[in-house]
């Protein structure tokens, strides 16, 4: 194992710590970041259909990310619905093997159902998703700063961070709405 202190690695660790342990308290910022990443990812998928210029693809994707990030920040409940729906539908789509159209229909229906269900459980969903996402981001940052960590140890550390993040956030946010 070695050390590689980079700004990217340290910033990734800080973002991971905030999301993992303070995700519910910092939910507006976390939602903004998640929606930015969703919009940016969609832009990276769509933009190459219109241009091959990597600069335009990057700038267009960033613009889409900023728009979706602002949308998520302002419309928190709709944002939770959309985020859970999108992620659930995308997850299910990856497991389906029925053909493109049936896969899309099933994934959209599943995403809409999960999004609607999420509105009944906003607080635990935000805590769980920020702890899981934050733990994953945090271990990514740790791997950038400390090189050569065995993959089995990385998985153990990530699962431990997620569990501690869940416990910490549920205890810390008992009285918050």
Image (cartoon, rainbow, N blue to C red):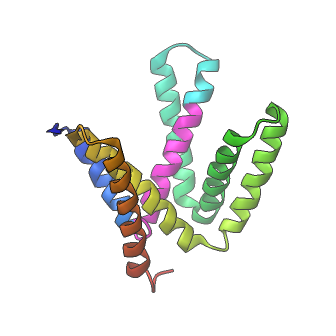
Q: Which residues are magenta?
A: 23-43
Q: Nearer the viewer, residue 40 or 100?
A: 100
Residue at (50% x, 14% y) in the render: 53
Location of residue 89 with respect to 81 vertically, above or below: above
Q: Nearer the viewer, residue 113 or 60?
A: 113
Q: Is residue 92 visible?
A: yes
Residue at the far bottom: name it.
Answer: 175
Provide residue 136's location: percent of width, then percent of height.
Answer: 40, 51
Name the residue at 55% across, 55% down: 72
Left or right of 48 on screen, residue 141: left
Q: Is residue 159 above or below residue 54?
A: below
Is residue 166 left or right of 14 when viewed as pictured?
right
In this picture, is 107 found above or below 156? above
Percent x, y for residue 171?
40, 81
Identity of the residue drawn at 34% across and 42% down: 151
What is the quadrant of residue 94 in the picture? top right
Q: Main secondary structure of the magenta part?
A: helix
């Amino acid at each position: 194992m070695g050390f590689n202190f980079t700004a990217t690695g340290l910033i990734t660790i800080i973002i991971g710590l905030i999301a993992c342990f303070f995700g519910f308290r910092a939910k507006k910022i976390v939602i903004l970041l998640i929606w930015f990443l969703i919009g940016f990812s969609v832009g990276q998928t769509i933009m190459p259909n219109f241009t091959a210029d990597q600069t335009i693809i990057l700038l267009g994707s960033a613009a889409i990310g900023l728009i979706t990030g602002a949308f998520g920040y302002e419309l928190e409940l709709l944002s939770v619905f959309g985020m859970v729906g999108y992620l659930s539908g995308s997850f299910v789509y990856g497991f389906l093997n029925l053909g493109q159209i049936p896969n899309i229909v099933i994934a959209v229906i599943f995403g809409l159902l999960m999004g609607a269900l999420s509105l009944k459980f906003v607080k635990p969903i935000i805590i769980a998703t920020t702890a899981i996402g934050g733990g994953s981001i945090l271990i990514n940052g740790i791997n950038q700063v400390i090189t050569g960590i065995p993959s089995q140890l990385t998985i153990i550390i990530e699962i431990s961070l997620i569990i501690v993040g869940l416990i910490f956030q549920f205890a810390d946010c008992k009285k918050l709405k």
